Amino acid sequence: MFIKEYKKNLVILKSIGSDYIDEAWIMLKGELPKDVSGGDIVKEANRIIAEYKTGKKRKKRSPFSLPSFFLGVFTASVLAGILFFVLMMVF
């Protein structure tokens, strides 16, 4: 991988080693600390690309999401039923 261009707010990376992506454009934040060098930016870009390749950052859906949904629906139904019967008794 090499840096093709480096401008104030844009780094263009060529030959990142992907079968699908030819180049990567990384937009920098407006205000960078004064002690940040070009090497630091390249290291950060390498980290981001490595995470993309390995899929390390992708979060998988929790296996408990569907049972949690049905538990929530059941609990809400029971509470609505109790509230209904209490209101029927009062009025």
Image: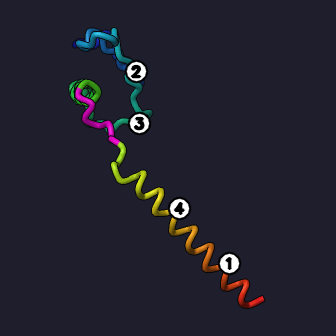
| Residue in the picture at 68% in, 78% down | 84
Disc on res. 73: 4
Mark 3 neighbour density, 10 Å: few (under 14) some (14–19) many (20 or more): few
Residue 59 colored magenta?
Answer: yes
Nearer the observer, 82 or 63? 82
The disc placed on residue 31 is 3
Check disc 2: other Cα within 10 Å, few if <14, some if 14-19, many if 20+.
few
Where is residue 57, by image quadrant? top left
Is residue 36 in the magenta section?
A: no
Residue at mark 1 to residue at mark 4: CA–CA distance: 16 Å
List x then y, in percent, for residue 79: 57, 74
Looking at marks 1 and 2 on the same chain, the residue that comes earlier in the sequence is marked by 2
Amino acid beneath label 4? Val
The answer to the question of whether label 1 and label 4 lie on touching residues, with beta carbons closer than 8 A, is no
State whether the magenta stretch is mostly helix, strand or loop.
Answer: loop
Name which of mark 2 and mark 4 comes first in the sequence: 2
Q: Which amino acid lies under the numbered mark 2 shown in the image of this protein?
A: Leu
Do the numbered discs 1 and 3 sit on residues whose CB atoms are within 8 Å? no
Q: CA separation, marks 3 and 4?
A: 47 Å
Residue stretch rendered in magenta on the structure: 54-60
- Locate the N terminus by quadrant: top left
| 15 on left or right of 68 | left
Which callout, 2 or 3, points at the residue further toward the start of the chain? Answer: 2
Label 2 close to label 4 by CB (< 8 Å): no
In this figure, which residue is indicated by the disc labeled 1?
84
Disc 4: CA contacts within 10 A as few (<14), some (14-19) or many (>=20): few
Q: Quadrant of residue 47?
A: top left
